[in-house]
Image (spheres, rainbow, N blue to C red):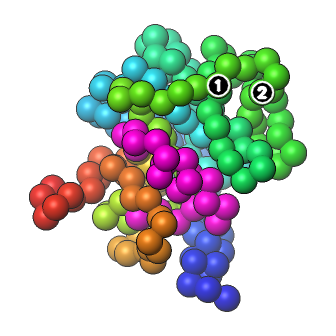
Amino acid sequence: MSDKTLLRKKYTALRDSLDSEYREACDNSIAQFLFLSEEYSFAKEIFVYVSARSEVDTFAVINRALADGKKVAVPHCRDGLMNFYYIGSTDELVCSQFGIPTVDVNKAVIAVPCDETLCVVPALSFDREGNRLGYGGGYYDRFLSMNKVKTAGLCREISVADSLPAEKYDVKIDCVITEKSVIRRRVNGGK
């Protein structure tokens, strides 16, 4: 097994083992740090994954962004590519073939990222240099390599790694938001 495969098993088991009350408390704090961040304030559009299973909950993020008058788009994956589609409410979500909430692409409008788009990226783990351990499909790396947007990862502190393996096609994210802080990636030796 590869290093990434072993790490995926480790961080999935860790995340799944957390008590639901602890997860909820962390997720509420993570959302508050996001809402207070310059990344969120700057954004007119939020491209955000729809949480499933033991991922950091994004329903509060979606609902708050909509209430704040921001455009919200969620991902839909097909044929190896991921696009985002605008939603006006979480009531518009349907269950995908993978059991993950998504949109009905026949009823939704495709979203085109702009300079004021923040993409909230999922992962099993992040490190402090902006590397992420995704699920292995490469959807976000492909999307982010083709679309220059601000990025943020939501992660419980317990799942922040000291260092993660990165390959040349892996796209680093700008910041990681935990229940304790906003960790911004150092660029060109700065903070």
Q: Is residue 135 left or right of residue 78?
A: left
- Check disc 2 and give the amino acid type: Val
Residue furthest front as drawn: 146
Q: Residue at x 77, y 45 (%)?
A: 78
Q: Residue at x 47, y 52 (%)?
A: 145
Q: Which residue does the numbered mark 2 point to in the structure image?
A: 105
| Mark 1 → mark 2, Cα distance in angstroms | 8 Å
- Residue 38 placed where, x, y %? 26, 32
Crowd tier of the residue under label 2, counting other residues whose Cα lies within 10 Å: few below 14, some 14–19, many 20 or above: few
- Residue 191 placed where, x, y %? 15, 56
- Residue 29 placed where, x, y %? 41, 39
Give whichever of discs 1 and 2 has the lower sequence position.
Answer: 2
Residue furthest right as drawn: 97
- Check disc 1 and give the amino acid type: Ile
Residue 179 vertical placement versus 131 (above, below) = above
Callout 1 touching callout 2 (CB < 8 Å): yes
Residue furthest bottom as drawn: 1
- Say if residue 4 shows up in the picture: yes
Which stretch appears magenta? 131-151
Q: Is residue 56 magenta?
A: no
Residue 5 vertical placement versus 112 (above, below) = below
Q: Is residue 149 magenta?
A: yes
Q: Which mark is residue 110?
A: 1
Q: Quadrant of residue 150?
A: top left
Q: Is residue 123 left or right of residue 98?
A: left
